[in-house]
Image (cartoon, rainbow, N blue to C red):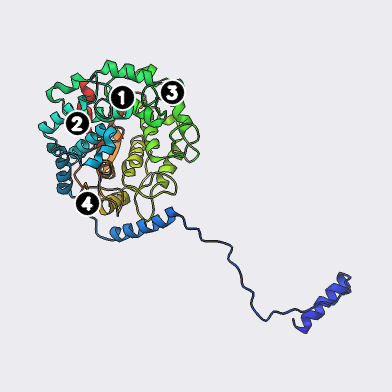
Amino acid sequence: MSSRDINRANFINTKLLGRKREPIDVRSEEDPEIENIMKTVETETIIDREEVMEACVKLLNEPLHVLDKDFAAGGLTFAFNSSMPPQMVALDASQAWIVYWIANSMMMIDPSLLTNEIKRKIVRKLFLMSKDNGPFGGGESQLPHIASTYAAINALALCDNIDNCWNKINRDAIYKWLLSLKQPDGSFTTCNPIGERDTRGVYCALSIASLLNIMSDELTEGVVEYLQQCQTYEGGFGATRLGDEAHGGYTFCATASLVIMNKLNSIDIEKLMEWCAARQCTEEMGLCGRSNKLVDGCYSFWVGGTAAMLEANDYHGCLKKEALRKYILNCCQSKTGIALRDKPGKNGDFYHTNYVLLGLSITESKFYYHGDDKTNRTPFDILSKSLSVKEVPSGLAFINPVYGIPNESLQEFHEHFI
């Protein structure tokens, strides 16, 4: 301290504060070390995401890739004409799903790929999974399951009523079975005598019923109230009303169920839009299914389809479609396994091929309702048309985001049961 500062300190102490002790000048010869109290936390997810970002950014810096339809078509056609490898036994209860994923992917790419011979194979295969032509199990001699029945109905919708197969569906049996799964709180179990109760079961039930034209007040009683309780503070939907974390798949199921019932405005749509927007990763440009999770190509449909339904209802701007499209084309095409994959470093598979293709179609489409009557809207009134995109569009089929089926197949199937 300077002599002037010391004199000033003495004056303050003695005259103003009345202190008698002399001020002491203490100086340190060394600068003290300042410890950083903010510790770097590295979790498995953080490390994995850094690796994924690095792989994605490298691919995203390349010019926009073109969808390799020939490679995709080759793998899908091979699947219907060959025996599955032994490791597929683990998916024995998912046979109806595998049929739907492959057939729907083929219809998305080129309807001519699904030949009459393949359609007959699908019909024979699926009806072997049902004792009375509906409801359907996951495989032959398995209990009927709501998710398997959903997949089977979707797959049959792609078969163009070959050999009058649609009339073989036992709608009465399916309706009675759905009623037996209905719970007092508005949910549905997935299977009898026991099964999960969640938003997935609600969506599968309403999708099946609306496609087969067997909807009733008895089926939908209490469903809206149940789904309202499943919307979380984040804005998305959890599996149940018990405070589960919001998830892309369950959010799609809840949103689609509300659209089927024309009750979308019964929830907090602004929060839902915020949640969807937050699922798009800035660096990777793709979508994740939950907060602080890795990007995954399948959410191009689960979250992208949710955004498409909101768009059709005049709630725009949830997602950056062009960015999502680049993630799909540059990061989700695989040369190992089946055509499309989760993310760089993964092999392609049937599941991701189907849902990534659906998501790609969404990024190249604009969704809207036919007509202005909002009171009597049905999900079959949702239409889509081409959206102006950079480079050449992929030329995939237009889809209905509620059902995940090409528009043309969906309309023919629905009208058959009117």
Instruction: Measure how far apart labels 4 and 2 are at the Cα level.
Output: 27 Å
Label 4 vs 1, first from the N-terminus? 1
Question: In which quadrant will I find the N terminus?
Answer: bottom right
Question: In which quadrant will I find the C terminus?
Answer: top left
Instruction: Measure how far apart labels 3 and 1 are at the Cα level.
Output: 23 Å
Residue tagged 4: 336
Mark 1, other Cα within 10 Å: few <14 / some 14–19 / many ≥20: some
Q: Nearer the viewer, residue 298 or 215?
A: 298
Mark 4, other Cα within 10 Å: few <14 / some 14–19 / many ≥20: few
Q: Nearer the viewer, residue 202 or 1?
A: 202
Mark toward the viewer: 2 or 1: 1
**SS state under label 1:** loop
**SS state under label 2:** loop
Q: Which label belongs to residue 158?
A: 2
Residue that protrudes farthest toward the front in the picture: 86
Q: Name the amino acid type tagged 4.
A: Thr
**SS state under label 4:** loop
Residue tagged 3: 186
Place residue 113 in its image quadrant.
top left
Instruction: Measure how far apart labels 2 and 1 are at the Cα level.
Output: 24 Å
Is 34 positioned to the left or the right of 1 in the image? Answer: left
- Mark 4 and mark 1 in contact? Answer it, CB < 8 Å: no
Q: In this rendering, does residue 68 appear at all?
A: yes
Residue tagged 1: 143
Q: Residue at x 14, y 45 (%)?
A: 74
Mark toward the viewer: 3 or 4: 4
